[in-house]
Amino acid sequence: MRSSIWSASVVGPTLGGAAIGLFGPVVTIAADAVSYLLSALGITAIGGAQPGPPAREAPRPRLAGLAEGWRYMLRHRQLRRSFLNSITVNGLIMAGEAPLTVLMLDQLGFRPWQYGLAFAVPCIGGLIGSRLARPLVARYGSDTVLRVFGPLRCVWPLGLVLVGPGVPGLLVVIGIELALIISCSVFGPVSATYRLQAVDHDRVSRVLTAWSTGSTAARAVLVALWGVLASTTSPSWALAAAGVLLLAMPFLLPLGIRAGEKAPLADGSSPARPGQLAMSTKRE
């Protein structure tokens, strides 16, 4: 599944940029909308008998469960550090996308197909990283992978301030995005496995729900703030600010804890049971 997602990410932006260049944005967006409609009709046409609901459905997450997930995560020293690092790094990376788009298409004069190519080719790094994660953990250990690739994913975005016009600028974007995606795709599954193994089994769903809602909210706030920053200063200044802040984020990484070990809570106590979850980076 992971390989299919990254393969689509390689092909999609390239074809989209070429379509915009050939047919214009209106026709391309209309064709994209029609493709979703055809997909929905195709799924409907499959038909067939649908399985009935289970005898006893699991209760939906409630506000109390979300609050409990937040309390558990924020009291857990290593999870708290990992959460703050994750939401800040991911949010700052996403926040730089809009200023970079304005910089490339408006100020540097890149064509739509060049813009699509700049973000399609680096997605090959997702395939590379997803294949590297498991053998790297097997050879060096998850703690070493977290120590190396956690900081690595924070250093690349600052290089986007060097983007200039023409082919050299295009190669800078491709190179930086490729290195960034490889680093993230190696770090991501190892960090997710560590997160699952650090949580008691009966708290996993609550913690993951709290993690997801917090990440979404933080990303929305940072994207909005960087939009304002880019408007009041310039896209280049916004990219530089995000890159500089990212350089400080490795200090939030939960170092010294190996995946599979339980980290102590903030009050000094230990979680009740050791994790038994396996590394989830096998080849898709």
Image (tube, rainbow, N blue to C red):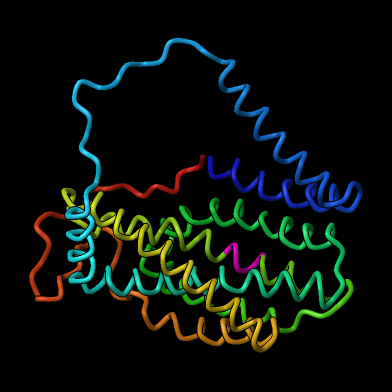
Q: With respect to residue 269, does 137 lie above or below?
A: above
The location of residue 130, given as percent across then percent down, is 54, 52
Q: Describe residue 47's horizontal placement relative to residue 128 as left or right.
A: left
Image mark count: 0
Q: With respect to residue 104, does 282 lie above or below?
A: above
Residue 149, visible in the rendered structure: no
* Extent of the magenta region: 178-182
Q: Residue at x 38, y 62 (%)?
A: 191
Q: Residue at x 36, y 68 (%)?
A: 143
Q: Which quadrant of the figure has residue 252? A: bottom left
The location of residue 22, given as percent across then percent down, is 91, 48
Q: Nearer the viewer, residue 169 or 106?
A: 106
Q: Nearer the viewer, residue 206 or 67?
A: 67
Q: Which quadrant of the figure has residue 176? A: bottom right
The location of residue 220, given as percent across then percent down, is 48, 67
Residue 257, visible in the rendered structure: yes
Q: Residue furthest right?
A: 22
Q: Residue at x 36, y 74 (%)?
A: 84
Asked if residue 228 lies in the magenta stretch, the reply is no
Magenta: main secondary structure: helix
The location of residue 237, given as percent across then percent down, is 66, 87
Q: With respect to residue 277, does 188 lie above or below?
A: below
Q: Describe residue 127's horizontal placement relative to residue 16 as left or right.
A: left
Q: Nearer the viewer, residue 85 or 68?
A: 68
Q: Residue furthest top?
A: 49
